[in-house]
Amino acid sequence: MTDKTNVLLIGAGGVGTMAAYNLEAGGQASVTAVLRSNYSAVKVNGFTITSIDHGFVKEWRPTHILHSVPDVSNEGSPIYDVILVTTKNVPDISPMVVELIYPAVTPNHTSIVLLQNGLNIELPIIAAFPTNPVISGVSLIGATETSPGHIVHDDRDRILVGAFHSPISQIPEGKSIAAAKVFASLYSASGKVSCTYDSNVAFSRWRKLIYNATYNGVCAITGMDTSRMRMAGFPIEDVIRPLMWEIWRIARAKGHELPESVIQDMIDCDPWDTYFKPSMQQDIEKGNFIEFENIVGEPLREAEKLGIPAPGLNMLYGLLKIKQLQIKESKGLVILPAKGDPTRPMLQFIKQKDVFLGPDCKFEAK
Amino acid sequence: MTDKTNVLLIGAGGVGTMAAYNLEAGGQASVTAVLRSNYSAVKVNGFTITSIDHGFVKEWRPTHILHSVPDVSNEGSPIYDVILVTTKNVPDISPMVVELIYPAVTPNHTSIVLLQNGLNIELPIIAAFPTNPVISGVSLIGATETSPGHIVHDDRDRILVGAFHSPISQIPEGKSIAAAKVFASLYSASGKVSCTYDSNVAFSRWRKLIYNATYNGVCAITGMDTSRMRMAGFPIEDVIRPLMWEIWRIARAKGHELPESVIQDMIDCDPWDTYFKPSMQQDIEKGNFIEFENIVGEPLREAEKLGIPAPGLNMLYGLLKIKQLQIKESKGLVILPAKGDPTRPMLQFIKQKDVFLGPDCKFEAK
């Protein structure tokens, strides 16, 4: 036992691995990482990281590596002070984050940090763990796992954290805010990255959605990176900018007065000629599920509730849902009807219970 | 010389080849086909056709095969009674049909039949050839060139023809109508297909746009065929049906009172489980340019002129334009700016003069 903060990381792709590295670099945290697709590669060779913040790092491993989420009710199991969730959110496909982290949460103790994209991701978490602080993390990092265990981190790590607020939480708001501040301090301990406590993190989350619901979705649909869109011009003016204004208007109706200048800022936020592919585009190229429900679907549903027109977003959402269906089919989760059946049956979906973490996973410490 | 009608076919893919075959099967037409990508294959082996209307046909050739559009001003050149154009319309990329057919048109004589998709395709033709009848052909065929010279024709050939009307035409409307009726009779002579004179062919063209501007565009963007969309259900309800209503409302504002039932008819018009891919989807898969400007762009511009909202179509148009840019780049027609140039230059387009028919083509008779 040490006096370090015991952090459980769920989801060690680009964002999660850099978070783990940075937390351990600060010297105040001990990270246990739950790995899935890259478990074997990292077990054998560790992570190889090329980082704009931390330099070149070879054969690095977090303090512990697991292949499944630990059950803290097991005798002798450590408890976790922080669970840092950096998985994708694909509520239309896989177990909710709630089910995933359930065995590792200690009520009244563990802070749950959702360093994830999208809107309304906290609602099921707060409902399931009403005695735990639930913290909103908005990451502005650019980091990609190029192959299992290989991370290229080429846009600086900047994180805003704050408390999610909800009337169904059973702890005082001040406790969640304090927990968010503690995490910000822990994440800043390396001195290499900026992690800021943000009292209005919901504003920041909407601000990021201006980029994510638009560039991210359109790049995923078309397969075009953000550089080419800017270099051609018309994709921005015909598609991206009108979509960004739709999100801007929904945010405003939700009470987040984003400045008008945020539109151009977000259009220009990627480096000019790195030909950056946002996460959903990368996911489609890799045949992974896309997290379009929280990134595009939830803002759209907010628009519908508020009566704000969002016709472009509505079309984008439908197209992304079609892409997700194709990914399901490529993973064997769709059964097409028998040829020539005169009753014209619909296709069927096979439920996949465990996308992130399989039932056959074993607990293995480093 | 025969007393047969001398037909020049421009564009011998699925639709064009079946038209040529059907015209010659009727015994009243002699077809000269201008081939491009399949010229060598057809020269050597002829066309191999599997047709729902005409059965299996092996090593078939039209009366004449050419590799470029003939110049009728050359001494001894035959003149053409009909020029049947079945190329795609890609005005954003390649020479207009006008430039393509110019050498083969005999003023005051040749009927120009545009058996092509989309809206406003006749405007430049009538402007360039004001003394020629210009005929609108709406084809409902399903025919695909699966490899050079191999045609699979699996949905019956049905054609509606009528006269394009325009105040800038210099011939009486009656003359164009008569020419359309003559062509309908010529095309029906085989007894195998239905070619009907349609006094309101503009209505039929809009009716077909209900399918083409929606299914065709969305299948192209997503890569999903029409069967899967119907079998899943949500792609129809979330995307296709709302887009179809947009086209329906534009058509109505243009004076074409399509019945409401046309929406469901068009949703269900493909065979249930043939997994049909509309033409633009096929083009994207083959790396060909897509004819989205006349199929989606023109209806959208009509909507703008008329003040009819078409936000879904607007988004679809922008996405298709992005896909076309990618096809341009894949064909070497895009120059990306030099890496790291601080002036952030835009990408450049290389003009491609001849997409259909190259300058090196030679006149060759069969």
Image: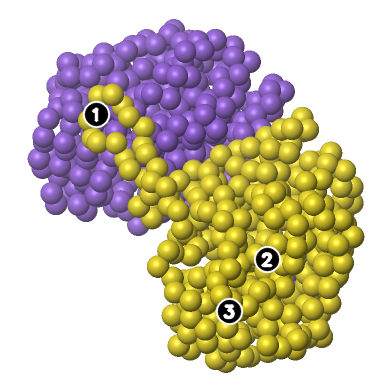
Chain colours: A yellow, B purple
Q: Earlier in the sequence, mark 2 or mark 1?
A: 2
In three-dimensional space, the C-alpha distance between marks 2 and 3, rounded to whole angstroms, equals 14 Å
Q: Position of residue B221 (x, y in %)?
A: 50, 45
Question: Which amino acid type is marked by label 3?
Answer: Gly
**Secondary-structure class at tag 1:** loop
Vertical position of residue B132 compared to residue A237: above or below: above
Question: Which amino acid type is marked by label 2?
Answer: Thr
Residue that mark 2 sits on: A106
Q: Position of residue A88 (x, y in %)?
A: 59, 60
Mark in the foreground, 2 or 3: 3
**Secondary-structure class at tag 2:** loop
Vertical position of residue A201 compared to residue B105: above or below: below
**Secondary-structure class at tag 3:** loop
Callouts 2 and 1 in the same chain: yes
Question: Which amino acid type is marked by label 1?
Answer: Asp
The chain holding disc 2 is: A
Label 3 crowd bin: few (<14), some (14–19), many (20+), radius 10 Å = few
The chain holding disc 3 is: A
Q: Nearer the viewer, residue A64 or B64?
A: A64
Q: Earlier in the sequence, mark 1 or mark 3?
A: 3
Vertical position of residue B22 compared to residue A193: above or below: above
Proximity of marks 2 and 3: CB atoms separated by less than 8 Å: no
The disc placed on residue A260 is: none
Residue that mark 3 sits on: A76
